[in-house]
Image (cartoon, rainbow, N blue to C red):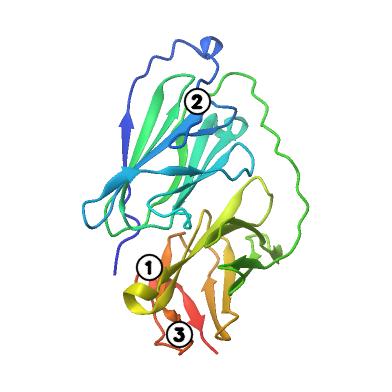
Amino acid sequence: MRNTQRIVATMVVTLSLIGAAELRAGSCVPGPETLCLLENQFSVEVQWEDFDTGTGSGQVIPKVVDDSTGFFYYDDARYLELMIQVFDACVINNRYWVFAVGLSDYMQSVTVTDTATDVAKTYDNPPGGYLHLTDTNAFATCPPLRTPRQGNAQPRGTTVLELIDGRFLLEVSWRDFAGGTGDGTPVAVTSHSGYFWFFTPRIPVLAVKIFDGSASDGNFWVNFGATNDVEFTLRVTDSLCQTTRTYFNPLGNPPETVSDRTSFRADCFIFADGFESGDVSAWSASVP
C-alpha cells in the first residue's frame, strides 16, 4: 500500500522582509505554466516526472472559482491532476495557508511564491504517492490590519457532477463536526474531472477525476481526495453499465487521495471489488 502522507516540504528562504509596512504589491504574471492567486500576490508552478522518465511543467486549467484556488493538468488536458488553494488567514493566525489535493502519483514539485516578498516554499511529492497538503503556517508575510478578502457568492445548484459525456454521475453528502449536514455542490473542471464545494463556493473541498484506463486494464479509474477531514459519502454511478460504488470517509479521517482502479469496467462487466491504493482501512465501500 502506498503511503500518501510522504510529503517533503522544503523552504527556499529569501527572507528579505524589511517590515510589513514596506511590502510591495504582488507581481505574479499569469501564464500557461504559472498560476497567480490572491490578486497576483502568489505564484504557483509545478514540475512533474512520470514513471518513464518523461518530464514536464504543470499546465494551468483556466477555471475560475475565485482568486484563491486554481488547477493544473500535466500530460493530458482531460484530467485535473492538482487542485491548490492559498487562503488568506491573516486575521486568524497572521499567516497565509496553503492546501493542495493531488490526483496523480507522478513525482511532483510544487513551488508557491509570495511575489510581494520573494519568500517561496517548495513541496516535493515522491513517485507513487499522492500529494496532500495542509500547511497552516506557510507564509508569515501578512501586512498589518488586514481584512479578509471576500469572494463572489454563488447559489447552490444541481448536486450531480456529470463526467465523460454524462456516463459517470457523482454525488456527495457531508457532515461536519458540529453536526451540520448537506450535499456537495459540483463544478466540472474538464470532461473527466471536477470538484465539490461544501460550505462556500470560494473553497473547493473534494477533487475527483475519472481516468480512462481501458487501454491499460479495461477499467475506468476513480481518483479523489479532500482538503479537510469532515465526514463525506461519495457516490459514483456508471449510468451506461448501471454500476454504482459508494465511498465513505469518516469524520476526522485525515484526508488523502484514494485510487480505485477496479470497480468500473469499460465493457460493462462488473469487475472485482477493491482499491489499488489509498488507506483502505479508513474507507468502506459497497457495490450493488
What amino acid type should be assigned to the residue bearing mark 2?
A: Val
Residue 9 lies, with reference to residue 148, above or below; the image says: below
Spatial CA distance of label 3 from label 2 is: 45 Å
User: First in sequence: mark 1 or mark 3?
Assistant: 3
Please give the label number shown on residue 259: none
Residue located beneath label 3 in the image: 267
What amino acid type should be assigned to the residue bearing mark 3?
A: Asp
Of 162 and 42, the residue lying toward us: 162
Quadrant of the rendering where the N terminus is positioned: bottom left
Residue 107 lies, with reference to residue 117, above or below; the image says: below
What amino acid type should be assigned to the residue bearing mark 1?
A: Gly
Residue 181 x, y percent position in the rendering: 70, 65
SS at mark 2? loop
User: First in sequence: mark 2 or mark 1?
Assistant: 2
Please give the label number shown on residue 29: 2
Of 102 and 228, the residue lying toward us: 102
User: First in sequence: mark 3 or mark 2?
Assistant: 2
SS at mark 1? loop
Residue 42 x, y percent position in the rendering: 50, 29
Residue 8 in view here: no
Residue located beneath label 1 in the image: 278
Please tell me which residue is depicted at 39% across the width and 50% down the height of the picture.
74
